[in-house]
């Protein structure tokens, strides 16, 4: 498996590669990951360093990528010595070790596309160069509907959809945050506070409706964004009942899910897969979510969590009140959520990835080989 | 410009053109290999799906009516000629959906001896059809595009092969896939 971004800086793609690799290893497969890393960076035993990554501006932000002769040489060496059955490259369109690996290899190659963007000048300019490399990928995976759409529009061709997984065990148990619930009156939210699509304004409005008649009601908000702006949307008298944590660590995130009586996901637009929702379910939180199709599917049409009319604060307030008054229903929804989330566990996701591997290797003899004749365009 | 320079220039152009053309031909050849491999994987996936369906139909864990419906659709899919193949495989997909989406089908099958294994095999087989068909159609699309390009057409770089056809079937997954653990 090849990760294009440097291993010592945490990120979405890197976390995906790590979790997938560990799930596959737990399942008894032999996995080797090639990723850029600093020379002195501590690496897990299954990671091979492809050399140091350099920060370069790429696609509108600064990415830490590895390229050049040294990296190309290490990629070839890794391919030659690994004698893999399948080569799985993440973000093969990113000019880093992933692209180098596709170039240098021949045989069953799987590519996973993560990014989704509206428009990319880089892809447009370098399209012919990329096409030649991407043609060699026999099985293509997209992690979300948005990533798949990006692929179809910018590079062409389709992909199968295999969403990100959640490591359910990581969230199952955690100590609640000090000073918070569950005490029968805490509603929680996690996500970008300044992104209207995540629906925090709807939740704040519902809180303002409910709070005056429920003295024990409190709101716990976590995620990147401006705390002042959030508090500004709540009447001054209620502000001391709203806790804004801002950006939280992985550990505190798990603790936050265990500190609430009702976890609210008020998103107003179709996220193809609510990773936050799945994490909350893994923690056994009672979920109240907007009834967008993706959430209805994850929650089994209300079996594993309550639903309210998307964007409707009054509906949210009504459902939240009903849930807070019914501890038994909350317990039942929590149990159902823990069961329903299992299908999003990494072990399940990894099984689908293995099916892709089996599909591309079904008829290809000889596994992954080094491409002869060097990197001729 | 003397004759020497002209002939050198012409020679250089010919060499470059040859290199470029042979690279393009090699690229198209690679695509054909990928296409054939993908086609073989798709055939393998369809055959193994039919095999699992037959096993399930013959296993006596289903009621006789369900068994018969499934066995018939599987037989149709396996014996269909090239013209009806896509149609028959789509029908099999629809039959599998009707069978698997019966109320509590998963729980009931899991309770029977060997049922859990059959269920897992069927999940895998259905998923692999979806994957291999996508991968094949990807390969077909790329190959078609490159066969149609001017240079490939003029110089017949693809030889006398027909443009690959897409494999279009209904392979939507059963709704009960959401409950697999």
Image (cartoon, coloured by chain):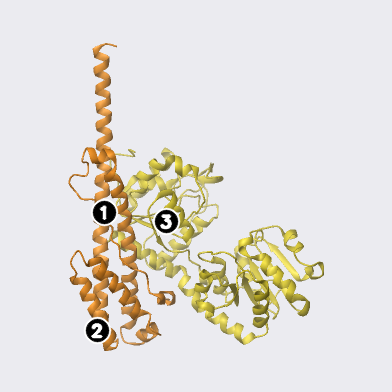
For label 2, the crowd category at 10 Å Cα-Cα, with few meaning under 14, some 14 to 19 and many 20 or more, is some
Number of labels in the image equals: 3
Residue B132, horizontal then vertical, whole percent: 31, 62
Q: Chain of mark 3?
A: A
The residue pinned by badge 3 equals A112
Tell me if mark 3 has few (under 14), some (14-19) or many (20+) residues whose alpha carbon lies within 10 angstroms of its own.
many
Residue found at x 25% / y 53%: B164
Secondary structure found at label 2: helix
Q: Quadrant of the N terminus of chain A?
A: bottom left
Give the answer, above or below, for where B158 lies relative to A227: above
**Colour used to depict chain B in the structure image:** orange
Q: Decide if residue A3 is on the left or right side of residue B142.
A: right
Residue B68 bears which disc, if any? 2
Examine the image and state in which quarter residue A292 appears. bottom right
Say which chain tag 2 marks. B
Q: Which one is closest to the eye, mark 3 or mark 1? A: 1
| Label 3: which secondary element | strand
Q: Can residue A48 be seen from the camera position used here?
A: no
Question: On the rendered image, what quadrant is the C terminus of chain A found in?
Answer: top left
Chain painted in yellow in the figure: A
């Amino acid at each position: 498996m090849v990760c294009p971004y440097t291993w010592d800086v945490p990120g979405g793609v890197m976390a995906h590669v790590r979790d997938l690799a560990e799930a596959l290893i737990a399942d008894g497969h032999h996995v080797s990951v090639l990723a850029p890393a600093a020379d002195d960076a501590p690496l897990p035993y299954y990671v091979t360093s492809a050399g140091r990554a350099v920060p370069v501006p790429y696609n509108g932000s600064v990415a830490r990528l590895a390229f050049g002769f040294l990296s190309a040489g290490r990629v070839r060496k890794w391919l030659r010595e690994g004698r893999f059955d399948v080569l799985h490259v993440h973000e093969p369109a990113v000019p880093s070790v992933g692209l180098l690996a596709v170039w240098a290899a021949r045989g069953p190659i799987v590519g996973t596309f993560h990014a989704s963007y509206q428009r990319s000048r880089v892809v447009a300019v370098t399209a012919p160069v990329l096409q030649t490399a991407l043609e060699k990928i026999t099985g293509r995976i997209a992690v979300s509907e948005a990533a798949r759409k990006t692929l179809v529009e910018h590079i062409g061709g389709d992909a199968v959809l295999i969403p990100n997984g959640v490591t359910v065990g990581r969230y199952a148990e955690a100590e609640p945050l000090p000073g918070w619930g569950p005490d029968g009156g805490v509603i929680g939210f996690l996500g970008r506070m300044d992104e209207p699509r995540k629906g925090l304004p709807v939740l704040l409005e519902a809180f303002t409706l409910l709070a005056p008649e429920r003295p024990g009601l409190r709101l716990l908000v976590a995620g990147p964004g401006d705390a002042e702006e959030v508090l500004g949307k709540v009447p001054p008298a209620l502000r001391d009942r709203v806790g804004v944590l801002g950006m939280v660590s992985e550990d505190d995130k798990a603790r936050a899910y265990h500190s609430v009586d009702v976890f609210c996901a008020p998103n107003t637009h179709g996220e193809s897969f609510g990773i936050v929702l799945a994490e909350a379910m893994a923690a056994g939180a009672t979920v109240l979510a907007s009834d967008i199709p993706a959430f209805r599917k994850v929650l089994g049409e209300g079996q594993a969590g309550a639903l309210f009319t998307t964007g409707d604060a009054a509906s949210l307030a009504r459902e939240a009140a009903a849930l807070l008054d019914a501890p038994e229903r909350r317990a039942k929804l929590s149990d159902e959520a823990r069961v329903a989330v299992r299908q999003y566990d990494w072990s399940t996701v990894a099984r689908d990835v293995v099916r892709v591997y089996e599909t591309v290797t079904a008829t290809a003899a000889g596994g992954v080989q080094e491409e002869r004749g060097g990197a001729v365009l | 410009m003397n004759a020497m320079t002209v002939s050198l220039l012409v020679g250089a152009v010919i060499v470059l053109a040859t290199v470029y053309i042979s690279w393009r031909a090699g690229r198209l050849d690679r695509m054909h290999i990928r296409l054939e491999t993908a086609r073989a994987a798709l055939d393998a996936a369809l055959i193994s799906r039919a095999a699992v369906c037959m096993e399930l139909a013959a296993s006596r864990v289903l009621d006789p009516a369900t068994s018969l419906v499934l066995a018939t659709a599987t037989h149709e899919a396996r014996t269909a000629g090239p013209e009806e193949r896509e149609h028959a495989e789509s029908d099999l997909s629809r039959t599998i959906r009707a069978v698997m989406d019966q109320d509590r089908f998963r729980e009931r099958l899991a309770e029977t001896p060997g049922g859990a294994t059959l269920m897992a095999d069927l999940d895998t087989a259905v998923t692999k059809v979806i994957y291999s068909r996508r991968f094949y159609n990807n390969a077909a699309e790329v190959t078609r595009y490159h066969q149609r390009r001017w240079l490939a057409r003029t110089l017949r770089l693809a030889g006398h092969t027909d443009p690959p056809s897409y494999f279009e079937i209904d392979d939507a997954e059963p709704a009960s896939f959401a409950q697999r653990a």
